[in-house]
Each structure stands twice: as C-alpha cells, then as structure tokens.
Image: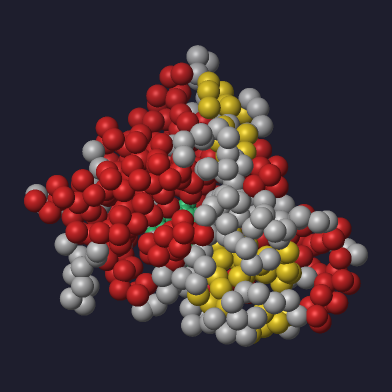
Amino acid sequence: MTQANDTVVAQGDAAAQCPFMTQEGWDFTNPDLMEDGVPQEEFAQLRKTAPVWWNAQLPGKGGGFSDGGYWVVTKHADIRDISKNAEDWSAAENGVIMRFDDDMPPEALEVTKAGLLINHDPPEHTRLRKIVAKAFTPRAVHGLEEKLDEAARKIVQEAADSGNGDFVHQVAVDLPLMAIADLLGVPQEDRMKLFDWSNSMMNAEDPDFPIDPQVASAEILGYGYNMADARRKCPADDIVTQLVNADIDGHSLDEIEFGYFFILLTVAGNETTRNAISHGMNAFLDNPEQWEIFKEQRPATAVDEIVRWATPVNSFQRTALVDTEIRGVKIAKGDRVGMFYGSANYDEEVFDKPFEFNVLRDPNPHVGFGGNGTHFCVGANLARMEIGLMFNAIADIIPDITKLAQPRRLRHGWINGLKELQVDYGTGK
Ligand code: HEM
C-alpha cells in the first residue's frame, strides 16, 4: 500500500471543501455511518473535488484488512472502467467485500476469498460462472414468472389482511427467498433456515442479528453438502443438481467450490432484492406522485429506477494488479479501490436530477448490478422480475398503503439495508 505525495497535496486543497477529509477515523465503510444513511453529501463533495480519494483507516479498524486504507472511487465512468478491466483490477487478490468485522481473523478472510465465485479472476472466474449462468438466462427466469407472481400476490394479500405492520418482514422478505429456494431446489419449508443463515452471515455487525456468522456458515455448508449427496443419488431439475454434475472443460466442482456456490447464491439474491423492495416502497411512500404514476401507467422503467435509488450494494472492491492511475491520481500495485455504486448511481454527470426518484427515468444506466464487467450480477434478470411482480401486486392489492414511521436502517459496512418499515396497508383493518 502506498500513497503518492502529490496526491496528498491535491487532496489538501479539496479538504477545505470537504471537512470529513481531515476527520480522524472517517471511513466510508464504517457501519455506524451507513446505519445513519448513505453519506450522499460527502460522496457529492468527492465527485466534485476529489473523485478518487484515499481513505486512511486507523490500525485495527480496517474491517478485517490491515493495509492502512483504500481508494474511494465515486464517479460512474471510473467504476465502469474498473469493472470492465479484469486484467488490471483483481477481484481475487483481496476479495470484493470491503468490510468484515474489525476482529475478523486473517485465516477467515483467506477462506472467504478462496471460495466465492465473485472473488475469482478470469480465466478461473469464466469457468465457474458458466456453471451457474445457465440457471439465470432470461428464458430460465421467465419459467418462474407465473409461480412467483402467484406467490407475490399471496404475500401481499396476507399483509393486507393484517391491516398494518412491518413491510420488510411481511412483504419484502419472502419472494426473494422463495425464488432462490426454488432455483436451488431447497424445499420451501426450509427457506426460513436460508433466511436465518444468510442474515447471520451478512449482518454480523448489527446487534439485532446475534447468531455467530461462523456457526451460520458452517450450518449452511452442512445443509448444502447434504443436498449435494441427495442430488448425486437422485438428480432433480435444480441448480444443486447442475452444480454437482457440472462438467466445464472436463472439470467438476470440488466440495469447497460447491459449498461456496451454495452460500453465494443464497446470500446474494436474498438481502439485495429484499432491500431493493423495501427501499422502493419507502421511496414511493415519500414520493406519492410517483406512486400515482406507477399505479396508473405501470412503467417498465420503474424497476431500474428502484434499483438505482436503493443501490442495495453500496460498494465492492478491486485490487490493483499494476501501478496505474485514475484521473491523474496514482494508484500503486496492491492498493484496494472501493467502487462506491451508491455514489455512482447519483452522479450528476450521468443522471439528470439524480436525487429525484423518477419511475419514468429513461435511459437509466445505473450500476446497481455492477459496472457491466465480468462479475455483472448473474441474478439481475431474476431480481428485476421479482421487484416488478412485487410492486404490481402491491399496486393492485394495497394501492392506499401509507407510512407509519421512518424505516430503521441496518448497521452494515457495505449493504444499504432497511430492517423495518412500519406501514398501514390501507385496508381499514
Ligand atoms: C436487486 C437485487 C440485486 C442487486 C442490487 C445485486 C447486486 C450485485 C452486484 C453489485 C454484483 C457485483 C457486480 C460486479 O462486481 O460487477 C452482483 C454479483 C452477483 N450477484 Fe447480484 N444483485 C442482486 C440480485 C441477485 C440475485 C437475485 C442473485 C441470484 C439469486 C444474485 C447473484 C449474484 C451472483 C452469483 C453474483 C456474482 C457474479 C460473478 O461474480 O460473476 N444477485 N450482484
């Protein structure tokens, strides 16, 4: 890790306009900061004055890393460039997750890095991705539509019957879980296990989720291995069967690769889609004119605006494989750069009036699913379909939904999450 002197000088000028820059311990991946809200003001200041900024981290406060900090990349164009250039920017070197527990042991970090598809570089990544990509083609996803539509309507109707309550748990949670359970071949009655395990693994920094993430990941791995054994004996039409029978260029998945696939698919499609739905509802409740437009016109553009607005994954990182520069800022080989999607999706150079929630926004080249590189979200088609089905069901069944309280936010270093949103479903019950 290095930090070029000329960069420090340039950033000295910017610091006058961005007070946080001189605040000791300021960290864009600090879960306390994110619990208060995505730091949009600070991102806007950076986009204007220091679009590539060195965020120093205090010893022991690196969220599992001990390299002194990372570069904050805030501009849409730079994030697209980094995402598309896997030769210079590695997902494997330090993994893509920017923030773990401060106490995360280095061995645990190594295991996490080694396993997940998202933490591999080509050509290994290309080989692994082929295995799951088939399950997520538009055709495969379309095959789930009728079932998920029915499920969405049932979920919303049950919430409506209760009169009022927490939208996150009553509405947003279940459809993403049902979809992923169905694709994986997990029996629907076990889907709440997936929910608990994935919550515990992902939300270790929030005191509302007390289960040890290491225990949860051991349990989910055990569950996955049992399923794999069962599918080897008796194949079914699901992703677990595809994974255990995978034959890519003469190779099959080893046990660890299989286990981490299982974890990634469970976790990646669960929290993200749930948060998109919860933030989307909150945005509609804060912008009633947009809800009216949605109810009347059902514009196809709404789903991507919800994902842009929500940006459930606030950041992922890459590591420089060579000495390089972005906008004249020197980045040394081995430095980590944080791609802050939560900033890029509000970049005034790309989005007209970015702080307006506009369901008719078109074009909408957001990077909520990544910057169009090799790791672009494999579940994007499925997520879009789920979000669309859910809001159509809400508009049909509970069009008069209103907000009872401001949402409670998740304490998390890189997920923009809501854990509670109290609403009245407008059914007079
Ligand atoms: C609104 C919902 C979702 C959001 C915001 C989201 C966001 C993302 C982002 C930002 C990435 C990294 C892209 C990159 O590095 O360029 C990603 C990758 C990934 N997503 Fe999603 N995702 C969502 C839903 C889903 C769903 C439903 C699934 C599957 C069930 C899924 C599975 C994955 C997988 C497996 C990867 C890794 C792909 C790779 O490394 O090749 N995601 N997602």
* Residue 331 in picture, x, y percent from top left: 67, 79
Residue in the image at 76% along x and 55% along y: 25
Q: Where in the figure is residue 262, as x and y percent of width and height? A: 32, 53
For image coordinates 42% across by 52% down, the residue present is 268
In the image, residue 197 above or below residue 251: above
Q: Position of residue 29 (x, y in %)?
A: 65, 55
The front one of 94 and 275 is: 94
The picture places residue 318, in percent across and down from the top left corner, at: 55, 70
Q: What colour scheme governs how the chains and residues are painted in the rendered image of this protein?
A: secondary structure
Query: Relative to 215, is 250 on the left or the right?
Result: left
Residue in view at x 37 percent, y 72 percent: 125
The quarter of the picture where residue 401 lies is: top right
Instruction: Look at the image and tell me whether residue 296 can be seen.
Output: no
Question: In the image, is 97 to the left or to the right of 235?
Answer: right
Vertical order, 187 against 366 (above or below) = above
Residue furthest toward the top? Answer: 429
Residue 333 quadrant: bottom right
Tell which residue pokes out farthest to the left in this image: 233
Residue 186 is left or right of residue 335, and the answer is left
* Tag count: 0
Considering only vertical position in the picture, is 21 above or below 215? below
State whether residue 121 is above or below residue 148.
below
Ligand 1 visible in quadrant: bottom left
- Rendered residue at 46%/71% (across/down): 92
